[in-house]
Amino acid sequence: MPWALALVIAVVTVAAGVGAPRALAIEPAGTFIQVPGTAPIYRVVGSAAIHVDSCAPLGGCPGIVKVANLDGYASTPANGSFLRYADGPNAGWIGEFVGGSPIHVDSCAPLGGCPGTVNIDDGGANDYIRAHPTPANGSFLRYADGPNAGWIGEFVGGSPIHVDSCAPLGGCPGTVNIDDGGANDYIRAHPTPANGSFLRYADGPSFGWIGEFVGGSPIHVDSCAPLGGCPGTVNIDDGGANDYIRAHPTPANGSFVLVADGADAGEISRAAGGALIRVTDCVALGGCAGYLTLDSGGFDDYAAVHPIPVDGTLLRGVPSDTTWEVLAGERVAVAPSPAAVAVNDASLAAIPIAPTASSGTGTQPLPAPRRRLRVRVKLTLSWRWDRGRTQLVRVETGRLRRGMTVRVRCTGRDCPRGALVANARRAPSALQALDGLIYHAGDRLLIVITAPGRRPERVRLVFRYGRIPRATLLP
């Protein structure tokens, strides 16, 4: 028994002998560490070991601690840790770690003075940041000061999306405070999530809805199976997701998408004015570089809602090098513009060319109501048009009964006036004030006539190139 005890003591003595490397011990921030028998030297930052490229700007890496291995160290520094460039062009630059990546600190004042900041040489810091350019998906950032103080964003594809409520997101764990200047700088450089990132609604009526980011906008995913399972999907609360999508309803012009499955598998389209225009020849379009893959169900759903580019979209046919503007669902030849999206000439066939007749006049009785109990008023409009300009020559109204109200509202980039509201007594003179106004192709005019106890009459006029406006009675 004494012999066995002595053996145990001897083993312990050897393990703890002078000069033996420490094992599984996390050294304090700022400590230099090295594994015996290897050349690399590391510096501890937030319980992680960051490689040192040169000890010269770090005072020679004094007090190097030998460690058996790096197994006990984190792969990335803890949230809220600070790094400072010790030399090089960025000397003095401080970054605060969020999801493994340092975000530039513009001012340490609102961050408690950036406690525990660790100097790293230029080469080592650059190597680390190249390997960790943006915070990990699902990390959280909070503005510590400024007009947006308290604003929280969750990272998706390198960009923080505003969080309206942390409740469905587990309380936004690990949120890191960032100063106003640093947060603004980062968001300006990363305004939208990277292409191919995925978002999922964490709550609300759209719970479970997944979208894949294409040109800054998430397009609905009907099935993740052909998309590799939608890797890295990030949950976003209902309010935050809705706010983002309202601000980014369609992909940026020029984005390419490929259908991954179904009858159209392999087909590529290009985003222009919110629509996805089929590509017939990628070679002519630079190889359709950077295309994103969409499942067929999601692609079809999006295309059904956005069949034609919005008014004002500029398209450049290739190889003809002709430029077109989309107006009221048709295209009109215009002067070349650097803003035009290049698409194949064959693809443009899906958008009809506006008629060649450039001018004319016409009188237009608005459609009669389809059902009883609707407002019944005779309204006739006379027009004169010249290419893309349409002038309202005269408005004639039938009898307007007491209690009726007429509302006229124009929408479009070239509307001559916003809205008109008048009761039955004032309506005739108010409508006559519209005489002579000029509208442009793509503008829309909504006329609504209401009366007590009756269903309102709603007519929409769409101004077209070289033709009388198209009138539609709305339900």
Image (cartoon, helix red, strand yellow):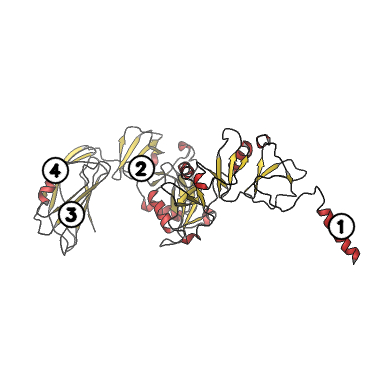
Q: Earlier along the polypeptide chain: callout 1 or callout 4?
A: 1
Amino acid tagged 2: Ala
374 over 111 or under it: above or below? below
Amino acid tagged 4: Asp
Mark toward the viewer: 2 or 1:
1
Image marks 3 and 1: residues in contact by CB distance under 8 Å: no
Q: CA distance from mark 3 to mark 1?
A: 103 Å
Q: Earlier along the polypeptide chain: callout 2 or callout 1?
A: 1
Q: Earlier along the polypeptide chain: callout 3 or callout 4?
A: 3
Q: Residue furthest bottom?
A: 1
The quadrant of the image that shows the C terminus is bottom left
Q: Earlier along the polypeptide chain: callout 3 or callout 1?
A: 1
Q: CA distance from mark 3 to mark 4?
A: 20 Å
Q: Earlier along the polypeptide chain: callout 3 or callout 2?
A: 2
Q: Residue 10 shows which numbered tag?
A: 1
Q: Residue 349 shows which numbered tag?
A: 2
Q: Residue 435 shows which numbered tag?
A: 4
Of residues 414 and 384, the one drawn nearer to the viewer in this rendering: 414
